Amino acid sequence: MLVIGKVVRVTRDGKLVVKAKALPKLGAEVYDSAASLVGFVYDIIGPVSSPYVVVKVTSPRIKRPDYLVNRLLYAMEVARRRRRGGRR
């Protein structure tokens, strides 16, 4: 697992803003310190020198994401399937 960084704040719509120590891929699954699924990487924002990772909370067990502020989050890189074929 890859340490993403520490949660800085929660947005109005419930997404988590994380000060990045390492950059995961978009769509990577995000876990807390208890190895419970929190959500997935939604976006990467900010300057290249100090980026932030936006995490969309999808876990039904997290009613109030406020408790995750100042806690470390971890990412599990998932292999995406490549789409082949289709119309031309």
Image (spheres, grey):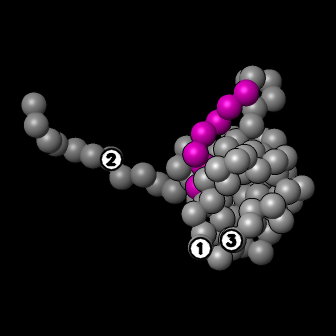
| Numbered label attached to residue 60 | 1
Q: How many marks?
A: 3
- What residue is shown with label 2? 82
Between the C-alphas of marks 2 and 1, the distance is: 29 Å
How many C-alpha atoms fall within 10 Å of the one at disc 1: few (<14), some, or many (≥20)?
Answer: few
Q: Residue furthest front?
A: 12
| Residue drawn at the location 59% of the way across and 73% of the way down | 60
State if disc 1 and disc 3 touch (CB < 8 Å).
Answer: yes
Callout 2 amino acid: Arg
Can residue 77 be seen?
no
Q: Earlier in the sequence, mark 2 or mark 1?
A: 1
Q: Which residues are magenta?
A: 40-46
Q: Nearer the viewer, residue 56 or 37?
A: 56
SS at mark 3 in the image:
loop
Q: Locate residue 1, reporting x and y percent.
A: 69, 60
In the rendered image, which residue does mark 3 sit on?
Answer: 62
Q: Is residue 20 left or right of residue 36?
A: right
The residues bearing labels 3 and 1 have C-alpha atoms spaced at a distance of: 5 Å
Determine if the magenta segment contains residue 88.
no
